[in-house]
Image (tube, rainbow, N blue to C red):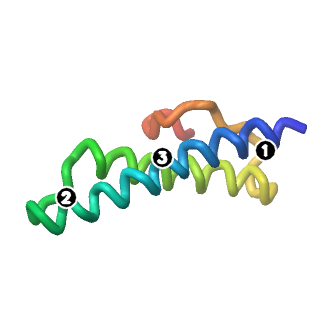
Amino acid sequence: MWLIPAMLYALVIGLVGVAFHLVSFFVVVVTGRWPIGLRAWVVRSLQVANRYRAYAALLTDKYPPFSTDITNSE
């Protein structure tokens, strides 16, 4: 029951991450550097997606928080 809102949240974060990844691709092609803010968002979106996938696959019992804070991943 609680998996549906969690997966919807992960979907939204993932879609924004994909959009930022595409923008980052063109920025890297033009400037040769990956902007720190875009890179951080892409990395966090991948971590959030993996955290929710682990919960959905019953690999962990701890409900993942609705946050992209990667320092609070006990």
Tell me if mark 3 has few (under 14), some (14-19) or many (20+) residues whose alpha carbon lies within 10 angstroms of its own: some
Q: Secondary structure at mark 2?
A: helix
- What amino acid type should be assigned to the residue bearing mark 3? Val
User: For residue 53, which numbered disc appears in the image?
Assistant: none
Residue 30 relative to residue 60: left or right? left
- Please tell me how crowded label 1 is: few (under 14), some (14-19), or many (20+) other residues with Cα within 10 Å: few
Q: Is residue 25 above or below residue 67?
A: below
* Camera-nearest residue between 54 and 17: 17
The residue that mark 2 highlights is 27
Q: Quadrant of residue 2?
A: top right
Gap between marks 2 and 3 measured at Cα: 16 Å
Question: Would residue 43 appear left or right of 54 to someone viewing this image?
Answer: left
Q: Is residue 45 left or right of residue 63?
A: left
Residue 8 position, x and y percent, is 70, 42
Give me the residue at 37% from left, 51% from top.
20
Residue, far left: 31
SS at circle 3: helix
**Image location (x, y in percent) of residue 74:** 56, 39
Q: Tell me, for residue 16, which label it has, or none.
A: 3
Does 45 appear above or below 26?
Answer: above
Q: Position of residue 12 (x, y in %)?
A: 59, 43
Outermost residue on the right side: it is 1
What residue is disc 1 on?
A: 61
